[in-house]
């Protein structure tokens, strides 16, 4: 190393950065096993189950490798084509898209976001440039405040400027031209504000459209997510389902390498746009000129080397690194299926990548000429190796690497070796001031486990189920219309009428159509009642969901319960069950209501139970939690899922009723005389059925969950 090599850590050593460290030529292919072995050691130190890495040299992918497992249960190994979540590494890709639109004249960096129809605090003063540089808060343009939510507003800018969503533009302008077939966006658009956005979610999740055909395959191949629990054991993790220009891209190291080659090769942007994107816009730390942020990229000078980079972290299972050394023609990409690749190093948050073990490994292997130290060795061996190094710059680098490994080992629970390294630092680097910087010495502790619920793959599967339900419902409606036009002439036609009604309305259908017999006018009246009931239920859902969405990002729990359960139950009681009980039993309204409440509750309990049990069953990857329902289409899917459960329940009720013991009011052995004391009026029968239904739901959730 040259004399002033690693002194860029000025805040630690209080020296001034100097010239570049001498760098050897890129090693030949037979040297890459050393890089592979070193990165395997980093993966082990960080406690990461699965990781992938790639190296680009002079616009050519020269090395790519998978490490560990994409699926521990099935011992499925990571490959260079394994998709991972990118989290905030989405930002540089989104920045490239914005700059493409700038070149086309669709977007002006210095136009306010309000001019593009974006509604947000300060929108009339905040420009597109301010969003890209994270300087939109406070006095716009003056101070860097990293904020993913503000960066996500670029989705509204893109849509306002072009009339197309961020996903659509990304697919058409980057994914397809670069042939990124391992790359997709998470299935739910965090910008979804209307039913149209919801349909876009559905279309993209199903892979409809040339830009999205490969999406379902990417979701199926996505590495399983993991996290470290409170005792540093690997546990199932989760991925988030939403996307925006700030986060939510899914990709492989090979695809990101292809993007990098296209970017540097001028296939996506002009040299002028690249220069503007990669020029420092504002320091990330006041008073430091070596760490800055450009347009969607960190820009850092370190030991005489210019670094363009971005990391990503989305707790608990996503972390990523995209690092470019433009002067050396090198690009280094690493993806992992826990968030520990970035959470272990708190200094990264201030825009200083020199804390990262992975970044130091790249320099150690391909840029600097330094001794390779086994940081898992015993204290005596380490002190002896380090004491033998005389070059001050080499010693500076090794000291930084020591503290970085200590953070990596400590963050994964290897506290004994972390303590050894602290002792080694005191013995081998006496008087050093590095240990005074908490960004180097603090060790990330264990975090609370986030329980997984649903996955991107499950969204795709569920969307297919919903599509099937829509087809069946449409056919059932046509059958009902036909029966109203030409009613059957035999009592058996009652069953023919009840079944399609059950598909459309769930348990309400048989209750409504139980009034029918071979008389055509009776059947028509029942059909009309079915249409009224269906309309009432639909109105109840619409009103409930509208109220929920109006509740903001964290809706009131009572509104949520109303949307899922209470208002539809009330509609069912008032419009269907109580009138049916009164007509067929002669009960007064109060007694009819009393007789109808429990069957309605049974419908809700088993219907909602079937929905959640089915969700758990489809969630074979256990990947993620259900996001906030910003898109009404998400609630439409939930509604249809509840109806699917209710349809299954209705068939159960039909069979029970055929045997004279059905708890649905007004539905007896069809075509027979109504008994004097109908069974639905017997509270002991209703309570018994309610207990059975609850037990079934508990059993389903226990077994399938």
Image (cartoon, helix red, strand yellow):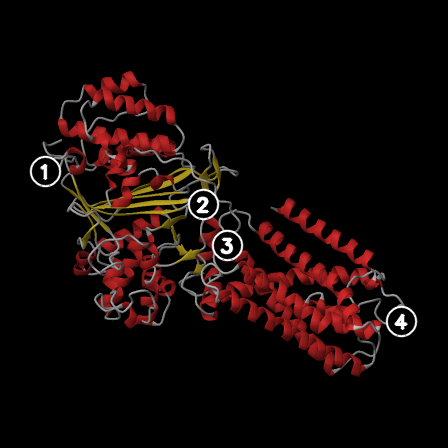
Mark 1 vs 3, N-terminal side: 1
Q: Residue under circle 2?
A: 223
> Which of these two is toward me, 611 or 439?
439
Mark 1 vs 4, N-terminal side: 1
Element type where label 4 sits in the image:
loop
Q: Residue under circle 1?
A: 18
Residue 565, position in %: x, y? 62, 62
**Residue at mark 1 to residue at mark 4: CA–CA distance:** 99 Å
Name of the residue lying farthest toward the front: 590
Residue 65 in sight in this render: no
Element type where label 3 sits in the image:
loop
State if disc 3 and disc 1 touch (CB < 8 Å).
no
**Residue at mark 1 to residue at mark 2: CA–CA distance:** 42 Å
Residue lying at 28% horizontally and 45% vertically, measured from the top left = 349
Q: Residue under circle 4?
A: 673
Residue lying at 29% horizontally and 25% vertically, measured from the top left = 422
């Amino acid at each position: 190393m040259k004399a002033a090599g690693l002194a860029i850590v000025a805040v630690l050593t209080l020296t001034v950065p100097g010239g570049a460290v001498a760098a050897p030529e890129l090693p030949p292919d037979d040297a890459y096993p050393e890089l592979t072995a070193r990165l395997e050691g980093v993966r082990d130190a960080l406690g990461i189950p699965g990781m992938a890495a790639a190296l680009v040299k002079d616009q050519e992918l020269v090395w790519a490798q998978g490490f560990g497992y994409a699926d521990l249960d099935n011992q499925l190994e990571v490959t260079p084509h394994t998709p991972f979540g990118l989290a905030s590494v989405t930002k540089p890709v989104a920045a490239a898209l914005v700059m493409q639109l700038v070149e086309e004249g669709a977007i002006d960096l210095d136009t306010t976001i309000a001019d593009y129809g974006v509604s947000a605090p300060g929108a009339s003063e905040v420009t597109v440039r301010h969003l890209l540089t994270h300087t939109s808060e406070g006095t716009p343009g003056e101070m860097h405040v990293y904020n993913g939510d503000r960066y996500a507003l670029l989705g509204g800018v893109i849509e306002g400027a072009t009339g197309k969503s961020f996903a659509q533009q990304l697919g058409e302008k980057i994914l397809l031209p670069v042939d990124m077939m391992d790359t997709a966006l998470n299935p739910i658009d965090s910008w979804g504000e209307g039913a149209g956005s919801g349909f876009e979610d559905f279309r993209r999740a199903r892979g409809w459209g040339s830009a999205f055909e490969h999406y379902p395959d990417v979701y199926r191949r996505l590495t399983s997510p993991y996290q470290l629990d409170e005792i540093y054991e690997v546990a199932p993790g989760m991925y988030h389902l939403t996307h925006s220009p700030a986060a939510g891209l899914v990709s492989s190291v090979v695809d990101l390498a292809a993007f990098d080659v296209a970017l540097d090769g001028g296939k996506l942007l002009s040299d002028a746009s690249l220069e503007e994107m990669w020029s420092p816009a504002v320091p990330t730390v006041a008073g430091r000129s070596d760490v800055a942020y450009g347009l969607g990229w960190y820009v850092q000078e370190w030991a005489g080397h210019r670094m363009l980079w971005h990391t990503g972290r989305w707790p608990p299972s996503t972390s990523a690194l995209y690092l470019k050394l433009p002067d050396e023609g090198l690009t280094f990409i690493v993806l992992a299926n826990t968030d520990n690749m970035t959470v272990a190093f708190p200094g990264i948050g201030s825009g200083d990548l020199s804390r990262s073990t992975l970044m130091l490994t790249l320099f150690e292997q391909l840029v600097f000429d330094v001794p390779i130290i086994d940081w898992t060795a015993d204290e005596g061996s380490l002190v002896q190796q380090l004491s033998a190094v005389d070059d001050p710059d080499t010693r500076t680098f090794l000291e930084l690497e020591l503290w970085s490994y200590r953070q990596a080992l400590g963050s994964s629970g290897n506290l004994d070796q972390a303590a050894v390294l602290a002792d080694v630092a005191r013995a081998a680097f006496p008087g050093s001031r590095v240990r005074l910087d908490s960004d180097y010495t603090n060790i990330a502790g264990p975090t609370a486990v986030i329980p997984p619920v649903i996955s991107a793959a499950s969204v795709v599967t569920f969307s297919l189920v919903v599509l099937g339900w829509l087809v069946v419902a449409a056919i059932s409606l046509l059958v009902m219309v036909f029966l109203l036009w030409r009613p059957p002439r035999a009592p058996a036609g009652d069953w023919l009428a009840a079944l399609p009604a059950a598909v459309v309305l769930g348990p309400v259908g048989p209750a409504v159509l139980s009034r029918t017999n071979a008389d055509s006018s009776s059947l028509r009246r029942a059909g009309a009642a079915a249409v009224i009931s269906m309309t009432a239920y639909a109105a109840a859902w619409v009103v409930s969901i509208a109220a929920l969405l109006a509740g903001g990002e964290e809706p009131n729990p009572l509104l949520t319960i109303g949307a899922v359960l209470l208002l539809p139950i009330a509609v069912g009681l008032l419009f269907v069950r109580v009138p049916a009980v009164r007509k067929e039993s002669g009960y007064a309204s109060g007694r009819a209501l009393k007789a109808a409440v429990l069957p309605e509750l049974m419908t809700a309990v088993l219907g909602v139970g079937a929905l959640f049990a089915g969700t758990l069953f489809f969630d074979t990857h256990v990947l993620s939690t259900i996001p906030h329902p910003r898109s009404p289409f998400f609630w439409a899917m939930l509604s249809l899922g509840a109806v699917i459960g209710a349809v299954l329940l209705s068939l159960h009720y039909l069979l029970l009723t055929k045997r004279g013991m059905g708890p649905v009011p007004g539905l007896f052995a069809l075509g027979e005389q109504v008994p004097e004391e109908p069974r639905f009026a017997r509270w002991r029968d209703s309570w018994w059925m309610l207990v059975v239904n609850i037990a079934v739901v508990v059993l389903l959730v226990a077994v399938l969950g």
